[in-house]
Image (cartoon, grey):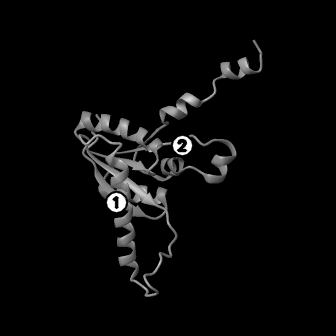
């Protein structure tokens, strides 16, 4: 039997990412899991300096993480039930790599991610963080398509009806 002691939920601070929260909180409740909410800020390596004085890279990174942590807390505050106990985590780096690294470091049993439903050229050009995590992670990954995206997908009947093929 699979026992999910630790569940990682990822967010990009979009409402679409909340779909992952619904699934993860159900599993978390079922297994009494510890749940982590991870936001990875993908920012350029050169963080700004203060008043022209070069600040140590570690201090700059810590300041950036604090800023992003506040952003994450504001995002969660109005959208996630206070009954759901989450450990908020912020990382800076390449999202797929940081998600994989965090999962390995913490011994995560399941990663839950929402997809944005990009297809075609947009998907080829932009890629998909979820797809990359599925490819590179040693941890099982559950990808969730948010309901608005599921509802907006065209069905064969829709196309046939629009083209008057009936």
Q: Which mark is residue 92?
A: none
Q: Which mark is residue 116?
A: 2
Check whether the beta carbons of the residues at disc 2 and disc 1 lie within 8 A of each other: no
Q: Number of marks in the image?
A: 2
N-term mark: 2 or 1:
1
Q: Which mark is residue 70?
A: 1
Q: What secondary structure is marked by label 2?
A: loop
Q: Is 128 situated left or right of 23 in this image? A: right
Q: What secondary structure is marked by label 1?
A: helix
Name the residue: 23% across, 40% down: 83
Name the residue: 25% across, 35% down: 29
| In the foreground, 8 or 73 | 73
Crowd class of label 1 (few under 14; some 14 to 19; many from 20; radius 10 Å): few
Q: Is 138 situated left or right of 118 in this image? A: left
User: Split into 4 quadrants, where in the image is the N terminus?
Assistant: top left
Q: Is residue 121 above or below residue 22?
A: below
Q: Position of residue 156 (x, y in %)?
A: 67, 22
Q: Position of residue 28 (x, y in %)?
A: 28, 39
Q: Position of residue 94 (x, y in %)?
A: 49, 62
Q: Is residue 103 visible?
A: no
User: Split into 4 quadrants, where in the image is the C terminus?
Assistant: top right
Q: Position of residue 135 (x, y in %)?
A: 51, 49
């Amino acid at each position: 039997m699979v026992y999910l002691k630790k569940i990682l939920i990822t967010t990009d601070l979009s409402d679409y990412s909340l779909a992952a929260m619904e699934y993860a909180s159900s599993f978390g409740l079922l297994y009494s899991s510890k749940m982590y909410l991870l936001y990875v800020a993908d920012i350029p390596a050169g963080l700004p300096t203060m008043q022209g004085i070069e600040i140590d890279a570690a201090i700059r990174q810590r300041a950036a993480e604090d800023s992003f942590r506040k952003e994450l807390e504001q995002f969660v505050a109005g959208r996630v039930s206070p009954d759901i106990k989450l450990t908020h985590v912020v990382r800076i780096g390449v999202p797929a790599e940081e998600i994989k690294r965090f999962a390995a470091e913490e011994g995560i049993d399941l990663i839950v991610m929402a997809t944005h439903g990009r297809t075609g050229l947009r998907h080829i050009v932009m890629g998909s963080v979820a797809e990359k995590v599925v490819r590179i992670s040693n941890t099982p990954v559950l990808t969730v398509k948010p309901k608005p995206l599921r509802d907006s997908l065209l069905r064969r009947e829709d196309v046939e009806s629009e083209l008057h093929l009936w």
